Image (cartoon, rainbow, N blue to C red):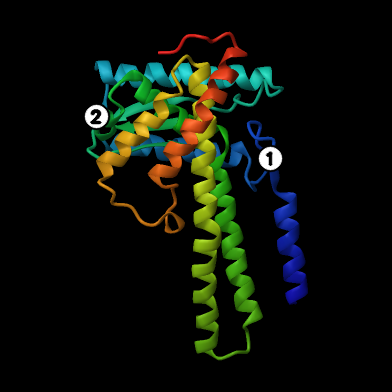
Amino acid sequence: MRKLFTIALLFIGVSACKTNPFTGQKTLNFYSNSQVFPTAFAQYDQFLSENKVIKGTSESQMITKVGQRISAASERWLSANGYPGYLKDYKWEYNLVDDDAVNAWAMPGGKIVFYTGILPITQTETGVAVVMGHEVAHALADHGAQRMSAGTLQQVGAAGVAVATSGKSAETQNAFMQAYGIGTQVGGMLPFSRSHETEADRIGLQIMAIAGYDPYEAAELWKRMKANSGGEAPPEFMSTHPSNDTRINNLTVWAPQAKAEAEKFGVTKFQ
């Protein structure tokens, strides 16, 4: 029974891989766009109906403008690199929502929200482009579907622990299940999430540069994010996101590479 369970788990992991066009790496993904996008679109519409969406202001128009420039840049890159139909199921939408949270987020299929609370940190259109590039990158790289897939595997693994400890006392079984939960969260799910954030930083930097925004401004934005946080953050190994210092260092190193990539598309001036 245990051997069959292990074989089944390995089969699921090996057979559920999809290539990330930006990295060339295989990713864990059980779900197709047709399975994920309709639900994401419905949830996005429900969120908008329950919150105050800002329309017709210079700030909301800037959010849309930046989003359109960056999604167009991503399409240019994908078409030039052998993925001309990659975005056919995407329905891009960019909304500004009245909320003091310093946050923005993306849902599968290109549905993006900025909260007004992040605008004092972004400060400029280029600052918005840093955040927008990151959120567009999450959508492009199927990070939502990958996290769903990882969650499915975690649930399957928990069932495996239950099978492996069957016949033992309830106390022993509970101890094993608790250890599994902590181990997979700290050793698996959190690093998995951090790798997505780092990947979105790098892809986002590249596509914002192709869109004509200065990639060197990304590190400056994260310096402002760090100052705004007041140093209140969990240790990096206990967080879903890289530390501010890690992000600042990474973005500083990657900025020249992003500019070089933009130059391949004839972009040599940046705002």
Q: List x then y, in percent, for residue 263.
A: 58, 13
- In the rendered view, tell whether residue 100 sits above or below residue 136: below
Is 253 on the left or on the right of 160, as rendered? left
Label 1, residues with CA under 10 Å away: few <14, some 14-19, many ≥20: few
- In this view of the protein, which residue sits in the foreground, 237 or 7? 237
The part of the image, by quadrant, that contains residue 12 is bottom right
Mark-to-mark CA distance, 1 and 2: 36 Å
Q: Which residue is mark 2?
A: 120
Label 2: how many Cα within 10 Å (few below 14, some 14–19, many 20+): few
Horizontal and vertical percent for residue 233?
A: 33, 52
Q: Residue at x 32, y 16 (%)?
A: 61
**Rendered residue at 46%/23% (across/down):** 215
- Total count of labels: 2
Q: Which amino acid type is shown beneath numbered disc 1?
A: Gln
Residue with the mark numbered 1? 25
Query: Which sits earlier in the primary sequence, circle 1 or circle 2?
Result: 1
Q: Residue at x 25, y 40 (%)?
A: 228
In this rendering, the answer to whether 144 lies above or below 82 is below
Q: Tell which residue pokes out farthest to the bottom in this image.
A: 169
Q: Quadrant of the N terminus?
A: bottom right
Q: Position of residue 170 (x, y in %)?
A: 52, 88
SS at mark 1 in the image: loop
Quadrant location of the C terminus?
Answer: top left
The circle on residue 239 is: none
Q: What kind of residue is marked 2?
A: Pro
